Image: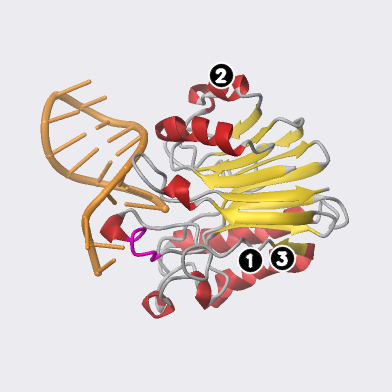
Amino acid sequence: MRIATWNVNSVGARLPRLLPWLEEVAPDVVALQETKCADGAFPYLPLQALGYEVAHSGDGRWNGTAVLSRVGLADVSLTLEGHPEPRLTSAQCGPLHVTSVYVPNGRSLDDPHYVYKLAWLQSLRERLDGFDPAQPLVVMGDVNVALTDRDVWDSSLFAHSTHVTPAERAALQSLIDWGLVDVAARPGKGDVPFTYWDYRAGMMHKNLGMRIDYVLASAPVRVRDAYVDREARKGKGASDHAPVVVDLDV
DNA sequence: ATGTCATCTTAGAGATGA
């Protein structure tokens, strides 16, 4: 089974890249984030034409998550309890339960959005108590946290920034400690499999990136291979995030 | 730190978010 997660930064704008990517990589299940469209505007038809069933949570301009599956789609959930923004979609996809998450950015340490981010991560952790770590499941998506200093290109530049604070890292670690494995993708250019590079200042070209997109898998998920698809971050009309692709057995 | 990108408002270029 092949799964993937990708913050597409608008599914509408990304469709000319997303559709050929799906044909080439042929994942069975895909978690999308930042679809940035209302449910009524979601491109169901071209995705269904590729064989995917779709569950989408979205309300327009911001946020938006989806699960695409060609191995079945059941028990769909479109919300994280207590948080109205569309930042979580989950479904049972054949033998694997899949959750697509778009964790709030936080913006800055003195912004209310940072408090919201920590609360959202706490709610996500509590949501896991409705599951069993002995069942095959993955939580994947843009978690907007770099787990270690190695997961940003220069940790000294993040001294007073979000994404690297002890509180954010502890919140992400608490998800892992529930019973999940932070799936290690093959190293990319350089030693760290970054998944995000700012559009500005030639960051991708200089490989000044961050690892903020994760696949967290429960113990019954046997990972065969995992990689960051840097090619999808290159060229015209790319998202600022690259997909993470994982081959696994359940 | 910020050289970009996407969307919405509302018919141009500015605001917002990342």
Q: CA distance from mark 2 to mark 3?
A: 36 Å
Residue A206 inside the magenta-drawn segment: yes
Q: Is A50 placed above or below B16 here?
A: above
Which segment did they paint magenta?
A: A203-208
Q: Secondary structure at mark 2?
A: helix
What residue does disc 3 label?
A176
On whether residue A213 falls in the magenta region, the answer is no
> In the rendered view of the protein, which quadrant contains the N terminus of chain A?
top right
Q: Position of residue A208 (x, y in %)?
A: 38, 66
Do callouts 1 and 3 point to residues on the same chain? yes
Q: Closer to us: mark 2 or mark 1?
A: 2
User: Tag 3's secondary structure?
Assistant: helix
Question: At 59% from the left edge and 39% from the top edge, which residue is drawn?
Answer: A25
Question: At label 2, which amino acid type do we have?
Answer: Leu
Determine contact: label 1, label 3, CB under 8 Å. Answer: yes
Please tell me which of labels 2 and 3 falls first in the chain: 2
Crowding near the residue tagged with mark 1, few <14, some 14–19, many ≥20 C-alpha atoms within 10 Å: many
Q: Residue at x 33, y 40 (%)?
A: A236
- Please name the amino acid that badge 3 sits on: Ile
Q: CA distance from mark 2 to mark 1?
A: 35 Å
Residue under label 2, please give it: A45
Q: How packed is label 3: few (under 14 Cα within 10 Å), some, or many (20 or more)?
A: some
Q: Could you tell me residue A194's position as x and y percent?
A: 50, 62
Mark 2 vs mark 3: give the one in front: 2
Pointer 1 residue: A172
Badge number at residue A232: none
- Report the residue at 52% width, 68% height from top: A192
Which amino acid type corresponds to the residue marked 1 in the rendered image? Leu
